[in-house]
Image: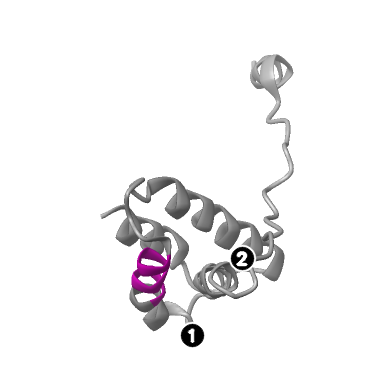
Amino acid sequence: MMLEHTISQLDIGYVPDHVAEEMGHLGYVQWLGAIRGNASYIGEAMRAYHLAQPFVRTSPAVAIFCHLLVASTASPVAPLELKLPAPARRGGAKARRDVL
């Protein structure tokens, strides 16, 4: 169920490349965190890839997600370079004061 939710979050159509990359990487981390501890990683990655594959043409974020799935199962094993969004300030107290 979490896999379907992750794919639906990623399938938002065209977005700029940097946004698609961030979303695809975040989707991969979300999917990775939801895998059961006793599950086969290769089996779960194949299942995720096959469920996401129909959305690759219409959503760049899903394409990045699928690329990470394929790269994570490649041999020899190599670390993935995941690019998470940079922390951003949202305003805090100053933003609340500016509204008044």
The kind of residue tagged 2 is Ala
Magenta stretch: helix, strand or loop mostly: helix
What secondary structure is found at the residue carrying circle 1?
loop
Contact flag, marks 2 and 1 (Cβ < 8 Å): no
User: Residue 57: which numbered mark, if any?
Assistant: 1
Q: Answer whether residue 44 is magenta in the image.
A: yes
Which quadrant does the N terminus fall into?
bottom left
Q: Residues within 10 Å of mark 1 (few under 14, many from 20)?
A: few
Q: Which residues are magenta?
A: 42-49
> Which residue is more in the foreground, 97 or 60?
60
* Quadrant of the image occupied by residue 21: bottom right
Q: Residue at x 65, y 72 (%)?
A: 76
The kind of residue tagged 1 is Arg
Q: Residue at x 52, y 51 (%)?
A: 29
Q: Residue at x 36, y 78 (%)?
A: 50
**Is 89 on the left-hand or right-hand side of 69?**
right
Q: Residue at x 74, y 17 (%)?
A: 94
Quickly name the residue at label 2. Answer: 20
